[in-house]
Image (cartoon, rainbow, N blue to C red):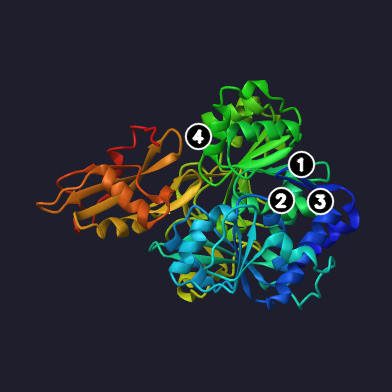
């Protein structure tokens, strides 16, 4: 089964049904499919074929949804780009993926211009929206490109289940981005599993608030289309706009990261909106505090599901949906399970294992690493066989997440095995930030940790030792980092100390360092 089948199924059953609400435009499934097919035919005319890579640098929009299906129609690989990355980071990804075509919103003209200056080779840029363009690459307007193309599907290449469909870049353990390969089988299996678990149907209206370049939301592109439900896109996260759109478009379901939910429930006017259409909301992409989960349920007055997953698994692995026997518990007892990481999703085999490979006891106390197996698990990392082999052993993906399991089989994550920081739903690896800090001429030693933050969940903090006779300010170091990496990865605060704590072997003792800050939540920019 492949991704083009999903759109064909939707068109056969729901051609006249409204499919997309985006930026003041509305398309039926028939209209949406014709636009996707036209884009595929244009891409084919530009020489794109099976196995080639196309990147997209774009906010949430109907064009993003069209691109997902157009690439799949050709058996090509789509590489969604995080538009919050710096030009240097984008350049690395584009070189590594070998993308030959880039679809970009004109709001990102500056980044695309910088790509040209950095020597990135792109055969064609397809611009959307209004604004300035770049002369760095051959370019065409999106609507002009598809205007005269055939509205029917391009002849399908022979697409197999194991062909790569998506390439999502995530930081490696060394900080160097690596491409997660997701196949047609991965994507389709995950879509079917979520349809079953979430009981998605053609009566649903999914609002895309989390970015479509991130799997916290991108998976819904396929599940929602498969059942003929409606897509509603929000280009940028603006709380009043999100709340107003949820009300006016009668949204029934969505998934957002905890920081988004936190801002929504704390919007002063939130109680003035009508959310009676909502049947369930999901949180994912980062851990969430039980108090926030409860606040979400109280504010939106609908069911709530916590999710956990990884880019490597399309993403969902667990959902906090109650088993039948748990629905007989009191509301307070039920909430305890709703606020947990959850139980394995359909199609997922999950174990929590100790270092010796034995499973932990299901006593909600013994801690181990989550490992998973199933048709939603990636084949591995793009052109990185060693990293693939380190992560996937005997068919099991080692997640690096530490958790406990209760007697009902519900998992609860207690920590991360490595020093990953989750800030605003984005993963930040401390090593990547430390590498930048060590390149600063005034810094002798540096350690980067995640500290509690009331807005972002975790904030990136740098603790540094300056070279003798050198000076630097907090503002200067933060600005220095922002020039080198995405702003969300840069430290939000910098502490200066005379010596970093060390272990007996001389390594920087991050655990001890973090304990100094763990009990002091901060609300920082």
Instruction: Give the Cα separation between the discs numbered 3 and 2.
Output: 11 Å
Determine contact: label 1, label 4, CB under 8 Å: no
Which residue: 60% across, 45% down?
210
The mark total stands at: 4
The residue that label 2 is drawn on is 194
Judge depth for marks 3 and 2 and give the one in front.
3
- Label 4 sits on a secondary structure element that is loop
Position of 440 with respect to 380 (left or right) is left
Judge depth for marks 3 and 1 and give the one in front.
1
Instruction: Give the Cα separation between the discs numbered 2 and 4.
Output: 24 Å
Circle 2 packing at 10 Å, graded few (<14), some (14-19), many (20+), is some
- Compare residues 321 and 436 and report the one nearer the observer: 436
The residue that label 3 is drawn on is 227
- Label 2 sits on a secondary structure element that is helix
Residue 206 quadrant: top right
Instruction: Give the Cα separation between the discs numbered 3 and 4.
Output: 32 Å
Which label's residue is closer to the chain start, 2 or 4? 2
Determine contact: label 3, label 1, CB under 8 Å: no
């Amino acid at each position: 089964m492949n991704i083009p089948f999903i759109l064909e199924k939707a068109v056969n059953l729901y051609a006249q049904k409204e499919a997309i609400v985006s930026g003041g435009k509305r398309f039926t499934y028939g209209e949406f499919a014709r636009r996707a097919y036209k884009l595929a035919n244009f891409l084919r005319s530009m020489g794109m074929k099976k196995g080639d890579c196309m990147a997209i640098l774009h906010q949430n929009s109907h064009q993003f949804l069209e691109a997902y299906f157009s690439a799949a129609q050709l058996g090509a690989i789509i590489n969604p780009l995080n538009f919050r990355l710096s030009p240097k980071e984008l350049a690395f990804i584009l070189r590594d993926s070998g993308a030959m075509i880039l679809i970009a919103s004109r709001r990102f003209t500056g980044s695309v211009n910088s790509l040209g200056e950095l020597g990135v080779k792109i055969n064609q840029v397809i611009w959307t929206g209004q604004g300035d363009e770049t002369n760095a690459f051959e370019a065409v307007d999106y609507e002009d490109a598809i205007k005269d193309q055939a509205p029917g599907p391009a002849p399908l290449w022979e697409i197999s289940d194991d062909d790569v469909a998506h390439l999502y870049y995530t930081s490696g353990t060394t900080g160097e981005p690596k491409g997660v390969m997701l196949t047609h089988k991965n994507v389709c299996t995950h879509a079917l599993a979520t349809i079953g678990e979430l009981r998605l149907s053609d009566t649903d209206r999914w609002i895309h608030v989390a970015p479509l370049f991130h799997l916290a939301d991108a998976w819904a592109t396929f599940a929602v289309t498969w059942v003929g439900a409606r897509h509603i896109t929000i280009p940028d996260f603006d709380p009043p706009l999100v709340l107003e759109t949820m009300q006016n478009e009668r949204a029934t379901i969505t998934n957002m990261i905890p920081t988004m939910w936190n801002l929504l429930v704390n919007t002063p006017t939130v109680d003035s909106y009508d959310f009676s259409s909502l049947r369930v909301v999901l949180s994912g992409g980062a851990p969430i505090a039980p108090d926030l989960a409860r606040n979400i349920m109280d504010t939106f007055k609908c069911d709530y599901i916590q999710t956990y997953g990884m880019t490597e698994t399309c993403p969902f692995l667990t959902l906090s949906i109650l088993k039948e026997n748990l629905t007989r518990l009191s509301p307070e007892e039920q909430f305890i399970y709703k606020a947990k990481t959850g139980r394995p999703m359909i199609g997922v085999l999950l174990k929590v294992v100790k270092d010796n490979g034995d499973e932990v006891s299901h006593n909600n106390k013994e801690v181990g690493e989550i490992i998973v197996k199933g048709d939603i698990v990636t084949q591995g990392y793009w052109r990185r066989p060693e990293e693939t082999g380190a992560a996937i052993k005997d068919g099991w993906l080692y997640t690096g997440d530490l958790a406990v399991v209760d007697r009902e089989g519900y998992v609860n994550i207690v920590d991360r095995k490595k020093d990953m920081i989750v800030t605003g739903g984005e993963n930040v690896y401390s090593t990547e930030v430390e590498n930048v800090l060590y390149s600063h001429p005034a810094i002798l030693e540096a350690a980067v940790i995640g500290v509690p933050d009331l807005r972002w969940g975790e904030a990136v903090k740098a603790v540094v030792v300056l070279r003798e006779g050198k000076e630097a300010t907090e503002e200067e170091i933060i600005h220095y980092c922002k020039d080198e990496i995405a702003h969300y990865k840069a430290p939000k605060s910098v502490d200066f100390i005379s010596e970093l704590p060390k272990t007996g072997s001389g390594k920087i003792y991050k655990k001890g360092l973090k304990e100094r800050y763990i009990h002091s939540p901060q609300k920082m920019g």
